[in-house]
Image (cartoon, rainbow, N blue to C red):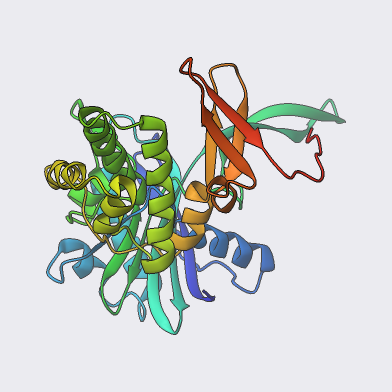
Amino acid sequence: MDIYLKKAVMHIIDRETGTPVFSEHELDLTTEYIRIYLTNKINKLSTAQTKTGVLLQESDFVEKMSGIASDFIPKSQQLVQYWYDIYSGSEDGPSADLLVVLYEEDTVLHLALLKLNYKENYTHFVDYEDEAVYNKLIINRAILPSKTQKPDEGLVVNLDTLSYELLEKRYEFSGEKLWYFSEKVIQSQPAPSLEENVREIKKAVKRIGKKFDEDEFELIASVKEAVYESIEETGTIDNQQIAEQVFKENISARMAYQEEVNESKFVDKTPPVREAREISEKKFGKQKLKMDNGIELIVPLEVYRNSELIEFVNNPDGTVSITLKNIEKISNQL
């Protein structure tokens, strides 16, 4: 999807000073490295940990961001101040920079709030001592994440529909770990992330598999394959498809699994993140097998189910043999 950046500003959140340092000027979007950095950060907000939902029109957050397209700098400051008034109550929330970005995606206006926690790193500093150059090695405690890293936290809002993507972390407030961004800032209950949903599926499958004496290794392999295919076909996880594919002809196990999932935190057919299929390809497109003898295999799904390329044999003594077939070339990757 093409992103067209319209406006952006960076505000500084230094927890030691106790107040945000607001910029009064927009970032220069004619500078290529700034455009690349911002675009990458927006794209990388879509992860397996990203949650989705829809903001309430009457929420405080929506009221604060209202009119930001026409009054960008003042509104961005108000929005960040509102966020900071909540965030500053955390005992362990680190200093960070906040990027506020207005952009179009498929001609639809979006707002992004991207939090970049500071990293510590070494750099040089040119000083002078007794009128001589003195090159020092110093620690810079305000290094931002690289362009290839995802934001530490962030929110992207479709300004037409108020649908959002949220990447958040838990911080401590009065001794209690809270998802402060969803609970306090946007006051919205998002759907579980892809990662959270899959975790609930795996837990349910393991419990039902044990109850019906099903092979756990084969069940989890089937879960991964079913999740991948469901996302490829629909962009989200269809639990009915998961149940049918994992438990196949075992109708009793399938029904028990459905009951188990219905009582869990799993949410069926959650609204997908923008990069759902790309995330699925990376996370579920391969079976990663680790044997107790130390051998590890990474097998693409299309190979895993092809008996002409790989075969799993259950031996009489209870061990398993794996046969790799029709290999024309082997390379050793250093």
The image shows residue 141 at horizontal and vertical percentages of 56, 33
The image shows residue 210 at horizontal and vertical percentages of 25, 28
Q: Is residue 106 above or below residue 279?
A: below
The image shows residue 281 at horizontal and vertical percentages of 52, 55
Q: Is residue 278 above or below residue 194?
A: below
Residue 59, quarter of the rendered image: bottom left
Q: Nearer the viewer, residue 16 or 186?
A: 186
Pick the quarter of the image with the C terminus: top right
Classify residue 37 as left or right of residue 62. Answer: right
Q: Is residue 251 above or below residue 290?
A: below
Q: Nearer the viewer, residue 62 or 292?
A: 292
Residue 15, quarter of the rendered image: top left
Classify residue 115 as left or right of residue 91. Answer: right
Going by the picture, which residue comes out furthest to the right? 132
Task: Examine the rendering and report whether any part of residue 212 can be seen.
Answer: yes
Q: Residue at x 16, y 43 (%)?
A: 252
Q: Residue at x 34, y 63 (%)?
A: 272
Q: Residue at x 21, y 48 (%)?
A: 266
Q: Nearer the viewer, residue 187 or 131?
A: 187
